[in-house]
Amino acid sequence: SARHVEAFATCDVPIIAAVNGAAVGAGFGVATSCDIRLLGASARMGSIFIKRGLASDYGVAYWLPRIIGAGRAMEIMYRGEILNAEQCLAIRLANKVFADEVLLEEATKYARMIADGPPLAYTLLRRMMQKTHDLTMAEFAEYEWTNQKLLLATNDVKEGFTSFIERRPAKFTGS
């Protein structure tokens, strides 16, 4: 539904998809709305809407061209194509492919890396990335600098620089 698609788009935290098996139709839409797609070797992804007489659903026509480019996205959607994990990786639809038995472990490691990072910076970075197609370069540069000024006033930035000087891992608190 439109509410689900919007919830993914407006979420303030990074979203990681871990796909093992088929992600087609609405599952494909959910996967494309995620920031990172980690696939198991057995994963298959694609847009089958056209084969059911539908154009698109779950934001696929919005997200897919942003991920892989308009021409390749149209080809996948026009053909109702289902790609295997290696094909997804080759066109940059997947960020990484792992053996099925380690996919969840690897996705958890990735999520832990993000969770240990600066939450405010991740939120603003996610928002900035989503605006890249909506603003002119001049507007984006202003938006980016506004966000940087907000972050420069946080304890997390102080901790980030202090930990660098002290040669230790940063301990971010989201403040």
Image (cartoon, helix red, strand yellow):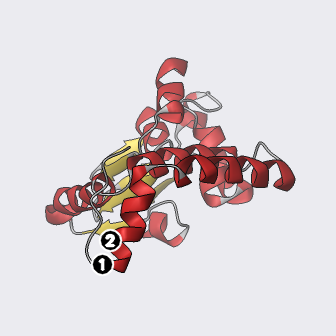
Instruction: Tell me the distance, in whole angstroms, between the alpha carbons under discs 1 and 2.
Output: 5 Å
Report whether residue 96 is seen.
yes
Above or below residue 51? Residue 146 is: below
Q: Is residue 64 visible?
A: no
Q: Residue at x 51, y 60 (%)?
A: 93
Residue 67 versus residue 89 in the image, above or below: above
Q: Name the residue tied to disc 1.
A: 166
Amino acid type of the residue tagged 2 in the rendering: Ser
Check the picture and name the quadrant holding the C terminus.
Answer: top left
Left or right: residue 70 compared with residue 175: right
> Secondary structure beneath disc 2?
helix
| Picture residue at 46% right of the left edge, 50% below the top | 122
Identity of the amino acid at label 1?
Glu
- Sort mark 1 into few (<14), some (14-19) or many (20+) by Cα contacts within 10 Å: few
Which element type, helix, strand or loop, lies under badge 1? loop
* x, y percent for residue 20: 27, 53
In this view, the residue in front, 161 or 49, is 161
| Residue corresponding to mark 2 | 163
Which is nearer the eye, 142 or 59? Answer: 142
Residues under numbered marks 1 and 2 in contact, where contact means CB atoms less than 8 Å apart: yes
Query: Where residue 120 appears, x then y in whole percent?
Result: 45, 46
The image quarter containing residue 107 is: bottom left
User: Where does residue 112 sit, x and y in percent of width and height?
Assistant: 24, 56
The label shown at residue 49 is none
Residue 46 locus on image (x, y percent): 49, 48
Q: Residue at x 48, y 27 (%)?
A: 7
**Left or right of residue 124: residue 158:** left
Q: Quadrant of residue 118?
A: bottom left
Residue at the location (33% across, 56% down)? 114
